[in-house]
Image (cartoon, rainbow, N blue to C red):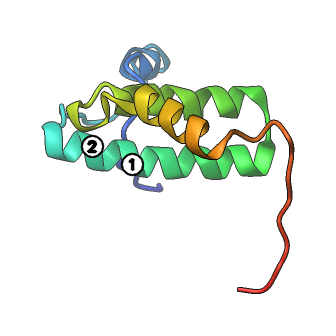
């Protein structure tokens, strides 16, 4: 049987209980939670890149929302607006080509 260790959505334990799936769990401290959220973001971004479905994009957004709740990222929207004002968004669909 494959082993796993990952951050899951809040209702997953109840879903597994209803299916009779055995597992162990613990609640992460702040440091572990941040580390696991970053790992989950990578996982969800990879899944979205492969599937490009709205469901996978929703998972990416859910992780971003959780990260934004952390104190060090609480000003995310302000930084986004600042960067958009300074550098623009992606509405013009510009693809830049050149040599590195």
Q: Position of residue 39 (x, y in %)?
A: 41, 51
Is label 1 in a helix, a strand or a loop? Answer: helix
**Residue at screen point 69% across, 39% down:** 89
- Quick one: label 1, few (<14), some, or many (20+) residues within 10 Å? some
Q: Quadrant of residue 33?
A: top left
Q: Position of residue 78 (x, y in %)?
A: 42, 28
For the residues bearing labels 2 and 1, Cβ distance under 8 angstroms: yes
Q: Is residue 50 left or right of residue 2?
A: right
Q: Distance between the residues labelled 2 and 1?
A: 6 Å
- Residue located farthest toward the front when viewing the structure as drawn: 86
Closer-to-camera residue (63/22): 63
**Residue at screen point 37% across, 22% down:** 13
- Residue located farthest toward the bottom when viewing the structure as drawn: 99
Closer-to-camera residue (47/81): 81
Residue 6 in view here: no
The vertical placement of 13 against 83, above or below, is: above
Q: In which quarter of the image is residue 29?
A: top left
Q: Position of residue 37 (x, y in %)?
A: 37, 42
Closer-to-camera residue (50/67): 67
Closer-to-camera residue (4/71): 71
Is label 2 in a helix, a strand or a loop? Answer: helix
Residue 43 in view here: yes
Mark sitting on residue 52: none
The vertical placement of 8 against 88, above or below, is: above
Q: Looking at the figure, which quarter contains the C terminus?
A: bottom right
Total labels: the figure holds 2
Q: Name the residue under label 2.
A: 34
Q: Mark 1 points at which residue?
A: 38
Q: Is residue 72 left or right of residue 21?
A: left
- Quick one: label 2, few (<14), some, or many (20+) residues within 10 Å? some
The vertical placement of 7 against 75, above or below, is: below
**Residue at screen point 47% across, 33% down:** 64
């Amino acid at each position: 049987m494959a082993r796993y260790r990952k951050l899951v959505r809040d209702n997953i334990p109840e879903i597994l209980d209803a299916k009779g799936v055995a597992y162990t769990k613990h609640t992460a401290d702040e440091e572990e939670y941040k580390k696991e959220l970053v790992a989950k973001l990578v996982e969800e971004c990879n899944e979205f890149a492969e599937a490009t479905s709205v469901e996978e994009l929703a998972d990416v957004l859910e992780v971003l929302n959780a990260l934004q709740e952390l104190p060090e990222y609480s000003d995310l929207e302000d930084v986004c607006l600042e960067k958009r004002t300074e550098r623009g968004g992606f509405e013009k669909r510009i693809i830049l080509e050149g040599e590195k």
